[in-house]
Amino acid sequence: MNTYTFANLKGGSGSTTSAVSVAEALIQEGKSVLVVDLDPQGSLSRWVASRSGSSTALLSGDFDAVEIESVEQGNDARGTFDVVTANRSLAQVDNVRAAKVAKRIERLWDSSSGYDHGLIDPPPSVGALVLGALMASDGALAPVEAGPGAMDGLKDTMQLLNRTGATPLIGAFACRVDVRTTLDTQVPDGLLDELGAVDDGGTSFRTFVREAIAMREAQTAGELPGSYDPDMTAVADYRDLTSELLTLNKS
Ligand SMILES: Nc1ncnc2c1ncn2[C@@H]1O[C@H](COP(=O)(O)OP(=O)(O)O)[C@@H](O)[C@H]1O
Ligand SMILES: [Mg+2]
């Protein structure tokens, strides 16, 4: 099982969108995927769990009496992935030690051996949840929202990874790139220049994700992006990004 945490300490970078979209691209590649929502805001849960079937406790026990709800999105139905959902009570977990969070997630991975991939969508703030998620992952994937100040959140995230040694950065990628805007298109180029391409031993993906109005609509409708609009530019981009990621696993 390959496990990744989407991480950018700047909120609104595209972590949740990326977790949902990469999960969808992975299942379309025939992979089985478990997505863990670790954000007390529960935006990923609200997005995808409304279409879920039965509710089971994938995480049995609790984090110091904090229940983590979980939802199984119908293993039998194709085109779905399983989600461990989050709610506000998770906020209390941010006060426990990161190592404890990591242990809990590792136990979840151990009991989820049937999955090819585990993806975590943590909150954007520094705390036990994000640190624990990183510690329990094989690597971090860092979405970078194109636009002014794009690099700031990434720098903070990379510093956290370096300082704590929690997990390596697998790769950064630009999100919400408006290809009509020079400033936006400079972001993916800048990432490649500064970090080097992942297939060259660096930490920038070659793929960037374009801004697509339909992405917000898919979220509002509670649908997976590719089933909401299979022709969405961002869906094609996330498919390419996922191919890059899968190629890395093979090498
Ligand atoms: N490719 C995209 N095209 C258009 N809007 C996007 C795209 N990616 C993300 N967004 C929007 O940007 C906002 C922040 O994205 P989100 O994934 O929630 O970030 P985070 O989880 O890092 O806070 C959301 O409103 C989301 O719909
Ligand atoms: Mg989010």
Image: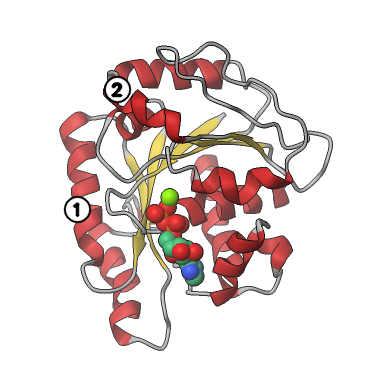
Secondary structure found at label 1: helix
Question: Is residue 135 shown to the viewer in this render?
Answer: no
The disc labelled 2 sits on which kind of residue?
Ala
Against 67, residue 28 (above or below) is below
From the viewer's side, name the closer residue of 136 and 85: 85
Q: Could you classify mark 2 by the number of other residues whose Cα lies within 10 Å: few (under 14), some (14-19), or many (20 or more)?
A: many
Mark 2 Cβ and ligand 2 under 8 Å apart: no
- Residue at 21%, 67% in the rendered image: 149
What residue is at 36 percent from the left and 31 percent from the top?
A: 91
Question: x, y percentage for residue 20?
Answer: 57, 51
Separation (CA) of disc 2 from disc 1: 21 Å
Q: Residues within 10 Å of mark 1 (few under 14, many from 20)?
A: some
Q: Circle 2 sits on which residue?
A: 98
Q: Nearer the viewer, mark 2 or mark 1?
A: 2
Where does label 1 land, which residue?
155
Query: Seen in the image, is 163 located left or right of residue 11?
Result: left
Q: Residue furthest front?
A: 88
Q: Is residue 225 left or right of residue 66?
A: right
Q: Residue at x 52, y 59 (%)?
A: 241
